[in-house]
Image (cartoon, rainbow, N blue to C red):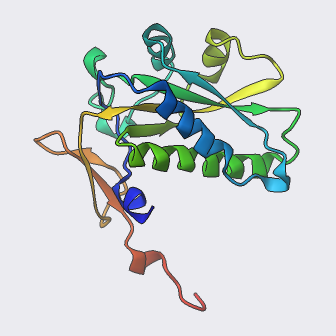
Amino acid sequence: MFKAIMKRRSIRRYKQMPVALSVLKKLVDAARLAPSAGNFQPIEYILLNKKSVVNQIFEHLRWAVYLKGKGTPSKDQRPVAIIVILINKKRAKFPFYTQVDMGAAIENILLAATEKGLGSCWFGSIDRPKIARDLSVPKSHSVEYVVALGYPDEKSVVFPMKKTHKYHKDEKNVIHVPKRTLKSILHLNKY
């Protein structure tokens, strides 16, 4: 598991190879098994693997703002599958904890995807009303997040954060992601 944690990065370019439906269902199953406050389990999922539907929802995602135009994948590098994360409002008793539940569920998706050799990218910058409309989401549910998926067609590496939190691409199109060091965030027994 720790290998998947260390390897997982946001991947925004994908090979145009289909991902088996059985693999995609396992990702949703991993999400389903995440902790849920009060065990209310308000999260539901729409799994998209039909190219026309994936492309339709692709248009409602905002890609890699720090890369200034270089973040949006070309048509031949778009995701081949998408998982849309919904909240069933009738089951969501505690809004704050529902957000926490979604974080745990989505991280399970991302780690399971990494373990299966897939790239993934979690989106919060999305056009929720248009996604809800295009996918016929009932009013009893709300669109919250999207996870794009596919076999990776780019590389991303971590380096210690120094001056900025902004990621960038080098001349070989490798994404460099600054992360705070363990020493800078860990406080043992007191601050």
Name the side, left or right, on which 181 lies relative to 21: left
Front one among 128 and 119: 119
Say whether residue 147 is visible. Answer: no
Please identify the residue farthest to the bottom as the structure is shown: 189
Front one among 165 and 100: 100
Residue 189, image quadrant: bottom right
Which residue is found at the position 83% from the left and 51% from the top? 39
How many marks are shown on the rendered structure?
Answer: 0
Residue 85, image quadrant: top right
Instruction: Relative to 69, say whether 116 is above or below.
Output: below
Which residue is found at the position 62% from the left and 46% from the top? 105
Name the side, left or right, on which 49 lies relative to 8: right
Name the side, left or right, on which 85 lies relative to 180: right
Instruction: Relative to 123, say whether 181 is above or below.
Output: below
Front one among 63 and 135: 135
Instruction: Relative to 151, say whether 174 is above or below.
Output: below
Which residue is found at the position 45% from the left and 7% from the top? 52
Front one among 181 and 69: 181
Residue 118 percent coordinates (x, y): 37, 39
Which residue is found at the position 67% from the left and 11% from the top? 133
Say whether residue 64 is visible. Answer: yes
Residue 10 percent coordinates (x, y): 38, 44
Residue 63, image quadrant: top left
In the rendered image, the quadrant that contains the N terminus is bottom left
In the rendered image, the quadrant that contains the C terminus is bottom right
Residue 91 percent coordinates (x, y): 86, 37
Please identify the residue farthest to the front as the structure is shown: 22
Residue 157 percent coordinates (x, y): 26, 54
